[in-house]
Image (cartoon, helix red, strand yellow):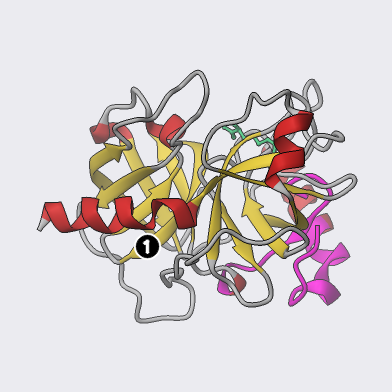
Amino acid sequence: MFLKSIFFLIAVGLSSANELRRPEGRIIGGTYVPIEDVPWQVALLVGTSHICGGSIYNKWTILTAAHCVYGEITEHVSIRAGSSLKNFGGQHVNVSKIIIHEEFNKETLDNDIALLILEKPLDTNNTLIKPIELAQEPPSPGTNVLVTGWGSMYSKPLDFYPQILLGVNLTVVDTASCREKYNLELPKPVVCAHQSGKDSCQGDSGGPLVTWPNPKLVGIVSGGPHNCATTYPGFYTDVASFRDWILKTINKLY
Ligand code: ARG
């Protein structure tokens, strides 16, 4: 397994060496993204296992999906920032508090957002670890967006979890037609994004969906079709709708 990972790392490294500055498509259909291109990305770990992604809001605070940390014991949860590898390098910091949205619904995935307060602040005095600005408004249909994570590169039963960070560019799909496609069974509020043969997948949850090339956080990976990269768009927590909740919740802490 270890050898296999090394070979994979080298293979992906070589094949995308000339594309480093242009994230495109694994996760499913994507390419390697160096952490300095997306310095807000963190890996969310439970014990030593990578379970989800997250985004740096400030030195003390990580944004993720509620379904990632629902039922987890704070003592077991930590994050790694500043590394393209989910298991090595960067800054590894324990989480001291998990705040799940009060109206999170684990069946419908309504309000799929949570804040993680860190035990000690991240050192952001470098190019690898930086907060991401929240979008003021939901992205309009057609907007180019980038989603990144260490989630599966293939749909089940062929899942494969990369060691290195991958990213894929998607296009925002209008919410009304996305809702229709899902027979109105979509969480609220939501952003949908799609691109043929490309998608986020299991393990990308909680991670960032940002506008690209001018990065603002517009979404948090929440869910999608059972198999990834189908004709169904992936769906993302609409970050702009939760700006007030985020600010209010953080203010209450201090
Ligand atoms: N719920 C998944 C997770 O926990 C994310 C699924 C995203 N799926 C998709 N087809 N976009 O990692």
Residue at image position (75%, 73%) is 20
| Magenta-span inclusion, residue 26 | yes
The residue closer to the viewer here, 137 or 156, is 137
Query: What residue does disc 1 label?
Result: 57
Q: Position of residue 162 (x, y in %)?
A: 69, 45
Relative placement, left or right, of 154 versus 201 is: right
Residue at image position (78%, 61%) is 142
| Magenta-span inclusion, residue 207 | no
The residue closer to the viewer here, 16 or 181, is 181
Does the beta carbon of the residue at mark 1 sit less than 8 Å from ligand 1? Answer: no
Residue at image position (47%, 60%) is 89
- Quadrant in the picture for residue 4: top right
Does 89 sit above or below residue 212?
above
Instruction: Please indicate, yes or no, whether residue 155 appears anywhere in the rendered image.
Output: yes
Residue at image position (70%, 34%) is 179
Does 41 sit above or below residue 187?
below
Q: Which part of the image, by quadrant, shows the C terminus?
A: bottom left
Q: Amino acid at mark 1?
A: Tyr
Relative placement, left or right, of 179 versus 132 is: right
Q: Position of residue 149 (x, y in %)?
A: 62, 50
Q: Which part of the image, by quadrant, shows the N terminus?
A: top right
Q: Which residues are magenta?
A: 12-36
Tag count: 1
Q: Position of residue 236 (x, y in %)?
A: 59, 44
- Quadrant in the picture for residue 60: bottom left
Q: Position of residue 80 (x, y in %)?
A: 42, 54
